[in-house]
Amino acid sequence: MVLAKVFGKSSADALQREAERLAALDRLDLLDTPRDEGLERVVRLIKTIFSVDIGLVSLIDAHRQWYKACSGLPNDEVAREDTFCRYVVDLEEPIIVPDATKDPRFSENPAVTGESHIRFYAGVPLKTKEGHTIGTVCAIDRRERSFSNRDLAILQELAGIAMDRIELMQSASTDGLTDTLTRRAFKQEADQLISLALRHHHDVACIVLDVDHFKRVNDTFGHAAGDEVLRAVAATCKTALRAGDLFGRLGGEEFAIVLPHVGREGALSVAEKVRAVISSQMVRGDFGELTVTASLGVSALSIVSKDIETLLAQADAAMYQAKTGGRNRCASWGATSADQRMASRRRVLKAGSIVFNDRRSTVDCTVKSIGTDSAGLTVSSSAGIPAEFVLSIKGEGFETHCQVIAQDRQNLEVVFR
């Protein structure tokens, strides 16, 4: 918390402010959601108005900067410690860097010294109505340049437009690309179905589906091909589901299904049907023909799984096991691990640290859900993280030993030991 001391905030105040900021970001439930054309227009306007190489609307959680809309950069996110924008979040005010090579904060930054060759940066806070800085809106260039007060005022107005768009998105119920429920609408309707099931003592099951090797499709054939794959997968899934089943898009290539009056074994049969029909379809477009597969995880209502967050966490863990097992397959939470503990979870967004190697190694993480005996974590990369470690939640005095029960490149499901 060096910045907190430098700019007149105590460590306690800074931790509290960060916790409130993450809570505000959590309420919006926007991280890892699909691209939005309204925000894409904002970043295109940034590039056009300021004649810069890169326009950006980003959200910043505990460990990373994630690009909600971006034009001019190839990646979707970057570790928070490597970003210029973390200073905007810490200061809660704009930062202008005419020439990054001459600024001691950034001269050795990988984005400056490496292939990105960043020289100019202008970033303003993306603020909620309550005043929480949940991210940034940026104009970035590969040439040093000046930025007038008028330019700054325009960029701040564009940040206001971006925030207005984000607030408007909260009322959307249908994903524009796939015509499925949005993540927020899916969870709201799922909660209602689960409440009815608990009241009337009938089954409910959940399936999480993730398209295999989707990044490879985007990288090889372009985002237009990726969009066509997602539309095709969504349309194919609908043909295998009943009218009363819920089907929503959780993130980029991740979908979820809630099946009323269906238990675990029945849901596994439905998952296998969905998997088979996806793998049997050919996706056609200007890019040619593609065969697509998906990995699916299943969970079911139980004495401890009584809410959509817990069901999704369990189905996610099963889906990661399906990925690890070779992809294009289904796995059930009840059969994925010798240790099946996972009590009810609540969704959170907290700053955490993964500590291992006799406390000599630390990896920043975001705690995305937590219960009394388990948690779901996201990291910039899970490579090198051992199967057992200590999880520390900053500012709460919380530490516990964990065992990884499922993981992919950026997500870890852990149980407490």
Image (tube, rainbow, N blue to C red):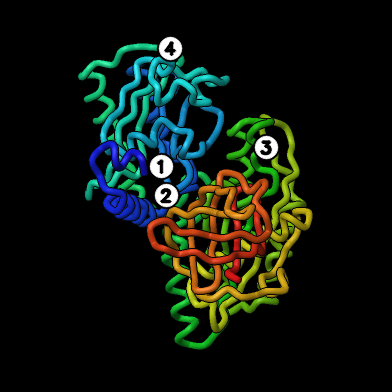
CA distance separating discs 4 and 3: 32 Å
Instruction: Name the spot of residue 200 as percent of width and height, x first.
Output: 48, 87
Label 2 Cα neighbours within 10 Å, binned few <14 / some 14-19 / many ≥20: some
What residue lies at 75% left-to-right and 44% top-to-bottom? 291
> Which amino acid is tagged 4?
Arg
User: Regarding mark 2 in the picture, which secondary structure is present there?
Assistant: loop
Q: Which mark is residue 143?
A: 4
Q: Which mark is residue 59?
A: 1
User: Regarding mark 3 in the picture, which secondary structure is present there?
Assistant: helix
> Which amino acid is tagged 2?
Leu
> Which amino acid is tagged 3?
Val
Looking at the image, do the residues carrying marks 2 and 1 touch, with CB atoms under 8 Å apart?
yes
Q: Is residue 324 above or below residue 6?
A: below
Label 3 Cα neighbours within 10 Å, binned few <14 / some 14-19 / many ≥20: some
Query: Left or right of 291: which side holds 176?
Result: left
> Which amino acid is tagged 1?
Leu
User: Regarding mark 4 in the picture, which secondary structure is present there?
Assistant: loop
What residue lies at 61% left-to-right and 75% top-to-bottom? 341
CA distance separating discs 1 and 4: 25 Å
Residue behind mark 2: 30
User: Can the viewer see residue 57 in this picture?
Assistant: yes
Give the mark nearer the N terminus: 4 vs 2: 2
What residue lies at 43% left-to-right and 47% top-to-bottom? 61
Point out the image quarter for the C terminus.
bottom right
Give the mark nearer the N terminus: 4 vs 3: 4
Along the viewing direction, whichever of 55 and 281 lies nearer the viewer: 55
CA distance separating discs 2 and 1: 8 Å
